[in-house]
Image (spheres, helix red, strand yellow):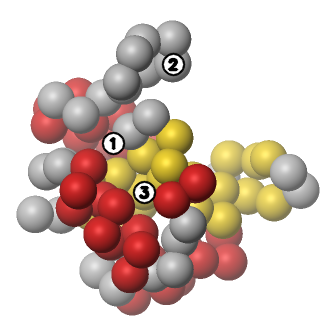
Amino acid sequence: MTVYIDPPMWPGHGRMWSHLISDTSYEELHAFAASIGCPRRAFERDHYDIPSHRYAAAVAAGAVEVPSREVIRLLVGAGLRRPKGRPA
């Protein structure tokens, strides 16, 4: 049971963002995100968008840092990938 985060390198709304994912389940992901104070509205299809100011807290809480290209590979491998345009 592992939660992963990529570096905050995705721009949007005047800040930089990371993606927080699970390789086990959405339930694990939702629980982890709640534990670091991330609101449920930050969940998008298969990941949470995490602002750069919360990155260190996510890592300190146990999220494993991975390169951005690993996020998709991990989601696909876990069967949790939900690309845009496909129903949940």
Pair 2/1: label in front:
2
Q: How far apart are the two marked residues, 1 and 3, measured between alpha carbons?
A: 12 Å
- Which residue in the structure is indicated by mark 2? 84
Task: Where is residue 76? Give x, y as percent.
Answer: 23, 28
- Which residue in the structure is indicated by mark 1? 70
Give the SS element for disc 3: strand
**Image marks 2 and 1: residues in contact by CB distance under 8 Å:** no
Residue type for callout 2? Lys
Instruction: Give me the residue at 18% from left, 49% from top.
Output: 25
Q: Is residue 6 shown left or right of residue 12?
A: left
Q: Which mark is residue 8?
A: none
Residue 39 or residue 46, whichever sits in front: 39
Task: Where is residue 74? Give x, y as percent.
Answer: 24, 40
Pair 1/3: label in front:
3
Which mark sits nearer the N-terminus, 2 or 3?
Answer: 3
Q: How far apart are the two marked residues, 2 and 3, measured between alpha carbons?
A: 17 Å
